[in-house]
Image (spheres, grey):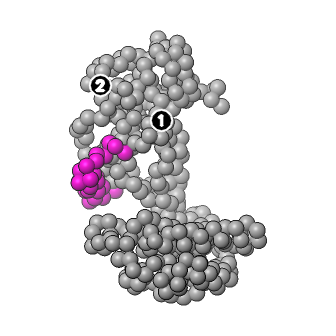
Amino acid sequence: MLADLPAVLVLNPKDNVGVVPANVDAGRTLVSGVAAAERIPRGHKVAIAPIAEGAPVLKYGQIIGYATRAIRPGEHVHLQNLAILDVALKHEFCVDNAPPVMVPEAERRTFEGYDRGNGRIGTRNYIGILSTVNCSATVSRYIAEHYARRFRETGHDNIDGVVALTYGGGCALNLKSEGGRILTRTFKGYARNPNFGGILMVGLGCETFQYGPLVEEAGLEEGRTFRTMMIQNHGGTRRTIEAACEMIDDMLPDVGRIRRTMLPLSGIKLALECGGSDGYSGISANPALGIASDLLVKEGATTVLSETPEIYGAEHLLTRRAARPEVAEKLLSRIDWWRDYTAKNDAELNNNPSHGNKAGGLTTILEKSL
């Protein structure tokens, strides 16, 4: 209950700002001797000590930026008085590494999942429609919508749904470029994702990003649960949708026959992705997922922290925990890659916090990363 929470949460004894868990009106006492100087929205930061102009602003005991003017205790700390400047981070390797105490194999937990073979274990049983070019995206969505309506009306035992995965390129893409290599790797990952019991790839026919080489390179073969099609080979949108539905109808019995079996929890690969962060994320969802990850890793499972630009400014904490120096070096090289990428595109890593992030109380990428 919010009523049971203090007016301000101070997350580390070193901090000179705190987070208000609920809207605070001007004049409300926050901590001893400090009252709110103005209305402060929930999830936002408030100064709990004087902060001189140019001085670091500390949250979680870490620098999240610098004061652009003097800030009095009780003032709202956000875009109007906080900005990111160059932060000299000390990158120490492996000094805080603490290997997890693994659960003995004989005592490890199990769960009911889908065994796809070759160590691939899924938690869902979907049929995926992969659009290899923007020109086939609409067709792919129409196919998925057909099955969404059909499943709502009749259901389908043991199949979670039919989903379309589309994107806005592929027509004249240079496949040897950075973007082309990333796209190819992404499609391979989706095509082999263990949460898919069946895959249909849909292309237009004249695009650069052809699915043929991709399928061959990924070691995939056409069969009852892996199909491909080109719109230009079927004579337009309507005929392609009809042909696609016939292919998926043929898949349904095979995909539906797959049943959950008892599998080791060590087969889980948990992917973490940022989405809609605000001032609460670092004190709620993020720590909860961290604890869940620790529990899974102790069982032999894997957690993947994706979207590496979103740890910018916090990488020094991760290099300290790295298992090996080469792991820390690899992380730092990825951060350098992002610096180079953003510079080439006339951007900067601190542009990362979105309007929604800022409205929710996050001011800088350093804060968001923590």
User: Quarter-wise, where is residue 46 in the image?
Assistant: top left
- Residue at 46% over, 78% down: 203
Amino acid at the residue labelled 2: Thr
Magenta region, main secondary structure: helix
For the C terminus, the quadrant is top left
Number of marks in the image? 2
Q: Say if 117 sits above or below 71 in the image.
A: below
**Residue toward you, 174 or 65:** 174
Disc 1 to disc 2, how far (Cα)? 19 Å
Farthest residue, direction right: 154
Q: Is residue 22 left or right of residue 358?
A: right
For the N terminus, the quadrant is top right
| Label drawn at residue 68 | 2
Q: Earlier in the sequence, mark 1 or mark 2?
A: 2
Q: Say if 130 sits above or below 62 in the image.
A: below
- Residue at 63% over, 84% down: 246
Q: Where in the figure is residue 297, as x and y percent of width and height?
A: 48, 58
| Label drawn at residue 89 | none
- Specify few, some or many for label 2: CA neighbours under 10 Å numbering under 14, 14-19, or 20 or more: some
**Residue toward you, 14 or 340:** 340
Verify whether residue 209 appears in magenta: no
- Residue at 42% over, 30% down: 12
Residue range corresponding to the magenta coloring: 323-352
Verify whether residue 351 appears in magenta: yes
The residue to which callout 1 is attached is 359
Q: Where in the figure is residue 85, as x and y percent of width and height?
A: 26, 35
State the SS at label 2: loop
Please name which of the two marks, 1 or 2, marks the residue nearer to the observer: 1
- Specify few, some or many for label 1: CA neighbours under 10 Å numbering under 14, 14-19, or 20 or more: some
User: Quarter-wise, where is residue 208 in the image?
Assistant: bottom left
Residue 86 in sight in this render: yes
Amino acid at the residue labelled 1: Ala
